[in-house]
């Protein structure tokens, strides 16, 4: 992004307007759009957005790996009837699973992917029609092409510690090392900024908070959306929400350390420090 474009982005985000509103879709009937439902299969079958195709978010989460299986993802994405230039809208019960699917689609080259703002909750609250009909999907020819700048690796983070902005999207307990879960070690990546992903979304509506609210959250956490940034969590899902929010606010060099703490906290060659609580 050139200097003039950055000025425009910053000007937009000082008002109550997202820098990239095109990343969000508001609840409305969709035409010429592939709609993906990332909820559990049983919930999809009980009722979904008309024309929506079910995507197995849990399978996608496990299958992504190190982002190298282009043939497998060509088939997986193509089987949903998605082409490289398809307009895609993803939703789930809230946002986390949908954001992961969105991020994976973008990584493999689906540039026109968006999130349904507020997800299923917003759709039903809007009084829009719901169906149990399962659409017939014609597989499309999709050639998955990895977009390497979207994926951060442990090696890259080790090589750029102190230079690259790292944003930890986990809970404060995880960040401070108080909630180790099943990891060998607990704590934070040295120098990482912390912002819990749940703070990005309104708890009642599941919609992303306003641009002004997001700007205030990022500023309070010491996060500069203009800096090259890698997000992380435990396994890439919460980090996908954070990556989305950063791009929504104008970040144009945002990567997801998808292996996240599941790798960092269980490696012997990674530095760790206890994060500091806000209060």
Image (cartoon, helix red, strand yellow):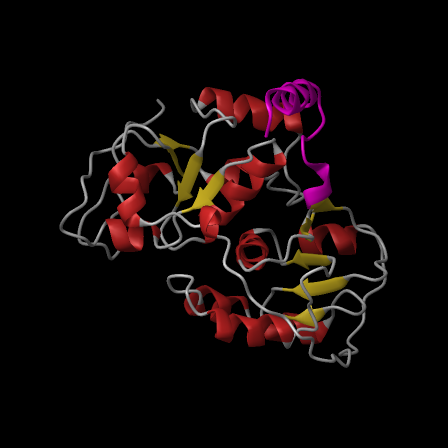
Measured as percent of width and height from the top left, residue 50 is found at 81, 68
Quadrant of the image containing the C terminus: top left
Q: Residue at x 60, y 74 (%)?
A: 41
Most prominent secondary structure in the magenta stretch? helix
> Is residue 169 shown to the viewer in this render?
no
Measured as percent of width and height from the top left, residue 224 is found at 48, 24
Please tell me in which quadrant of the rendered image residue 129 appears: bottom right
Left/right placement of residue 89 relative to residue 94 reads right
Quadrant of the image containing the N terminus: top right
Number of numbered callouts drawn: 0
Foreground of the two, 205 or 118: 118
In this rendering, is residue 96 above or below 77? Answer: above
Q: Residue at x 25, y 41 (%)?
A: 158
Residue 17 falls within the magenta-colored stretch: yes
Please tell me in which quadrant of the rendered image residue 172 appears: top left
Left/right placement of residue 31 relative to residue 184 reads right
Measured as percent of width and height from the top left, residue 244 is found at 56, 43
Foreground of the two, 155 or 275: 155
Foreground of the two, 232 or 173: 232
In this rendering, is residue 143 above or below 264? Answer: below
> Is residue 242 shown to the viewer in this render?
yes
In this rendering, is residue 273 above or below 32? Answer: above
Left/right placement of residue 238 relative to residue 136 reads left
Residue 148 falls within the magenta-colored stretch: no
* Residue ranking furthest to the front: 2
Measured as percent of width and height from the top left, residue 186 is found at 22, 45
Foreground of the two, 46 or 271: 271
Q: Residue at x 79, y 50 (%)?
A: 27
Q: Which residues are magenta?
A: 1-23
């Amino acid at each position: 992004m050139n200097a003039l474009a950055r000025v425009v982005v910053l000007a937009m985000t000082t008002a109550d307007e997202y820098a990239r509103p095109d990343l969000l879709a508001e609840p409305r009937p969709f035409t010429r759009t592939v709609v993906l439902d990332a909820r559990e299969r049983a919930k999809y079958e009980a009722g979904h957005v008309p024309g929506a195709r079910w995507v197995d978010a849990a399978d996608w989460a496990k299958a992504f790996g190190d982002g190298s299986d282009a043939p497998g993802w060509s088939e997986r994405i193509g089987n949903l009837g998605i082409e490289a230039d398809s307009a895609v809208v993803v939703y789930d019960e809230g946002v986390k699973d949908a954001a992961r699917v969105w991020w994976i689609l973008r990584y493999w080259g689906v540039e026109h992917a968006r999130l349904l703002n507020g997800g299923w909750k917003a759709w039903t609250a809007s009084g829009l029609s719901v169906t149990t009909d399962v659409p017939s999907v014609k597989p499309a020819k999709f050639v998955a092409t990895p977009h390497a700048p979207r994926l951060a690796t442990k090696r890259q983070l080790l090589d750029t510690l102190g230079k690259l902005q790292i944003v930890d999207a986990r809970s404060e307990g995880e960040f401070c090392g108080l909630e180790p879960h099943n990891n060998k070690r607990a704590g934070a990546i040295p120098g990482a900024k912390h912002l819990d992903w749940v703070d990005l979304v309104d708890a009642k509506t599941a919609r992303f908070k306003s641009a002004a609210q997001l700007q205030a959250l990022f500023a309070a956490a010491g996060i500069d959306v203009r800096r090259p940034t890698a997000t992380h969590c435990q396994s890439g899902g919460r980090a996908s929400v954070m990556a989305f929010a950063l791009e929504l606010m104008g970040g144009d060099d945002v990567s997801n350390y998808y292996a996240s703490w599941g790798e960092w906290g269980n490696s012997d060659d990674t530095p760790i420090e206890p994060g500091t609580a806000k209060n």
